[in-house]
Image (spheres, rainbow, N blue to C red):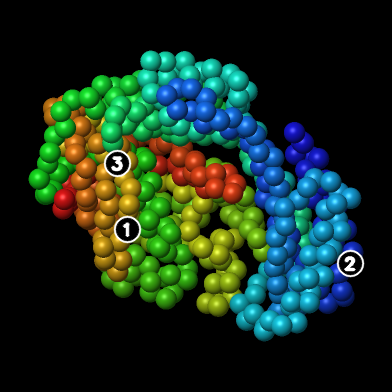
Amino acid sequence: MSSSVERQAYFDELIASASSTLHSDEVLLANLAGEATDFVRLNNNEVRQAGSVDQQKLSVDLIAGQRHVGGTINLTGDMAMDKPRVVALLAQLRAQRRLVPDDPYLLYNTEPTSTDNVKTGDIPSPEIALATIRSAGQGKDLVGIYASGDTFHGFANSLGQRNWFQSSTFNLDWCFYLEADKAAKNLYAGFNWDDNAFARKVDWSSQQLIALAREPKVLRPGDYRTYLAPRAMEEVMSLLSHYGAFGCRAQETKQTPFLRMLASDAHLSQQVTISEDTAGGVAPNFQSAGFIRPDKVPLILDGKLAEALVSPRSAQEYGVPTNGAHGGEYPESMTIAPGSVPADSVAEALDTGLFVGNLWYTNFSDLSACRTTGMTRFATFWVDGGEIVAPVSVLRFDDTAFNMLGDHLEGLTDDTEVLLDPSTYLERSSASARLPGALLSEMHFVL
């Protein structure tokens, strides 16, 4: 496995070589994304697939004036092969560029700002991690995927700017499966493996597994006191984010789910403070046009809209400064500030009501009103007198974020959970969140 220094040197030499072939009126932007990942898939607590992935992808944008064309290739790691392939790609893009019109919203960083950020972690070897995981699943049907290793991103341009970001993380996305649609779902992810923290998660999942074996409780549609665990909160926040809740473009075009907050004095609870916390996440602290991201961007402060995520294109179109957001303008490293509800005794704080561990199929039933809908998933329990008494049959909720994070929010837990996106489609995701659980006085269920 190559070191960070070796990877950076390879990238730098490759782009320096490509830059030497540019015409006098051209600017080159280059982005590298790669990983060195070990992974294991388990079923019935047995290893079903194991392997490693070592890959690098180079994306370039060839600019002349306001015209530009981009392309992507996978790198081999052999300089003698990669240099001519990049030069050939640039020649192809140069020919294509003659056919495209000017881009009025093109904006890239012309003031070179170089950075180097390498986050190391304390991660056990795959062999040790696997032994620990299988020991925890002894006697149970443990199903899941474990991935660990480095993800890295680089930016370079022909103006001399160089940026590097690398982080070492692990991600165990697993469940204890019982039968049919019954499973106790959990996630353990982060930068530093802690046997005690993992043991607590295993113990909690084991307790859930016992409760899942009981006769399910069937609830009628209505309003129920509810606790949303961090994973359930993540589903709601991801939905809001990807539909433009925090993006400049969505706010300027009035297509944001937080439209009421723009058009009136509507707000969330004063307990809610949401930020894009780049410094605490696993996404790079720069974006594809070379702009540097602030360590933190406040999105919601004490329940009220603060700053928006502004991509370079939105900055150019709407005449506002960019803060290094990517084109989608949704958070990649979201954090919600913790509250005061003791995380280790949320069942007691809930007293009687629903404990919702996961949600899925979330969508908007009315985007302009920020009304969301979705289904409970995996371990959802009925709690009575602070004790889990029975699993609950699948429910559909339909409620607004202004209720869930506003009028009906009693409190947020005093601890947050690191949630790394377990997606490995094409490459390991660099999205993450650090979220508390939420205690609601009521949540509306329709099915």
Q: Residue at x 29, y 41 (%)?
A: 377
Image side of residue 85 versus residue 42, left or right: right
Foreground pick, 229 / 79: 79
- Give residue 21's mark: 2
Q: Residue 321 falls in which quadrant of the image?
A: bottom right
Q: Which residue is mark 1?
A: 363
Foreground pick, 263 / 212: 212
How far across and how far down the image is residue 340, in percent?
31, 36
How far across and how far down the image is residue 324, in percent?
59, 61
Image side of residue 349 versus residue 336, left or right: left
As shown in the figure, which amino acid type bears the numbered disc 3?
Arg
* N-term-proximal mark, 2 vs 1: 2
Q: Which residue is mark 3?
A: 377
Mark 3 secondary-structure assignment:
strand
Q: Residue at x 42, y 64 (%)?
A: 244
Mark 2 secondary-structure assignment:
loop
As shown in the figure, which amino acid type bears the numbered disc 1?
Asn
Question: How many labels, in total?
Answer: 3
Q: Residues within 10 Å of mark 3 (few under 14, many from 20)?
A: many
As shown in the figure, which amino acid type bears the numbered disc 2?
Thr
The quadrant of the rendering that contains the N terminus is top right
How far across and how far down the image is residue 222, in percent?
11, 49
Foreground pick, 73 / 382: 73
Q: Nearer the viewer, mark 3 or mark 2?
A: 3
* N-term-proximal mark, 1 vs 3: 1
Q: Residues within 10 Å of mark 2 (few under 14, many from 20)?
A: few
